[in-house]
Image: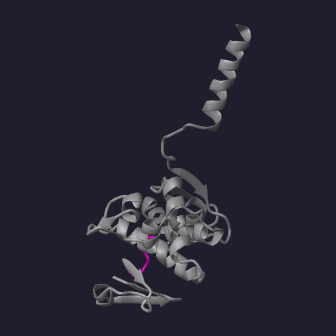
Amino acid sequence: MKNVKKLLVVSTIALSLFGFNTQSKAASNHVVKSGETYWIIAKNFGVSANSIKSANKATSNMLYTGQTLTIPASTISAADKDLMARLVSAEAKGEPYAGKVAVATVILNRLDNADFPDSIKAVIYQKDSGYYAFTPVQNGTINNAADADSKKAVTEAIASRGLSQGSLYFYNPKTSTSDWILSRQVTTKIGNHTFAK
């Protein structure tokens, strides 16, 4: 009986220390180190630079060594980041790193746009007129593990959230069969992809 009690106590302590905490990470503080920028801090914490500036009521990009910043809780879960990275990996395989960041940015721009679903999972798995918005969902390649560059690109896209050109779509003009997509305003071209809004 004593061993059962010990096991119960040890298990309870282990659970409280190591896991099963389903609450989202609360806001925290960060003391600015020499050379840090909002961008660097945002990438390290997995939040957008704009959200850090907003949480601290910053009106400029100036930071001072020793300054204490409130870092808001990330609104994007680890599972959503992984899902984004897997989509980026499948959609932008063989594309330059900047193209991977741009694909991740399209997902975030859709999330922030009222014309699209209001969760990352719903954006990625969106279906319209019987077709998925993203080919890797249709063909199953989204289920493959993401490469390191795609994971890094997602982190970078999150850090720069709200600073892009507003791209909501991307396509390969050599393979696209949609006249509609060709009518959209082009924002940039990276590698084999054209980005548009």
Residue 93, horizontal then vertical, whole percent: 57, 77
Res. 58 visible in picture: no
* Secondary structure mostly seen in the magenta stretch: loop
Is residue 139 on the magenta stretch? no
Task: Please indicate whether residue 22 sits to the left or right of residue 127 in the image.
Answer: right
Question: For the point 57% across and 63% down, which residue is it?
Answer: 144
Q: As drawn, which residue projects farthest toward the bottom?
A: 174
Q: Is residue 141 above or below residue 25?
A: below
Q: Quadrant of the N terminus?
A: top right
Question: For the point 54% across and 68% down, which residue is it?
Answer: 154
Q: How many marks?
A: 0
72 or 57, nearer to the observer: 72
Task: Please indicate whether residue 89 sits to the left or right of residue 110 in the image.
Answer: right
Residue 147, horizontal then vertical, whole percent: 63, 68
Residue 183, horizontal then vertical, whole percent: 28, 90
Question: For the point 57% across and 83% down, which residue is it?
Answer: 95
Residue 128, horizontal then vertical, whole percent: 28, 68
Residue 30: image quadrant is bottom right
Residue 68: image quadrant is bottom right
The stretch of residues the image draws in magenta is 161-165
Is residue 163 on the magenta stretch? yes
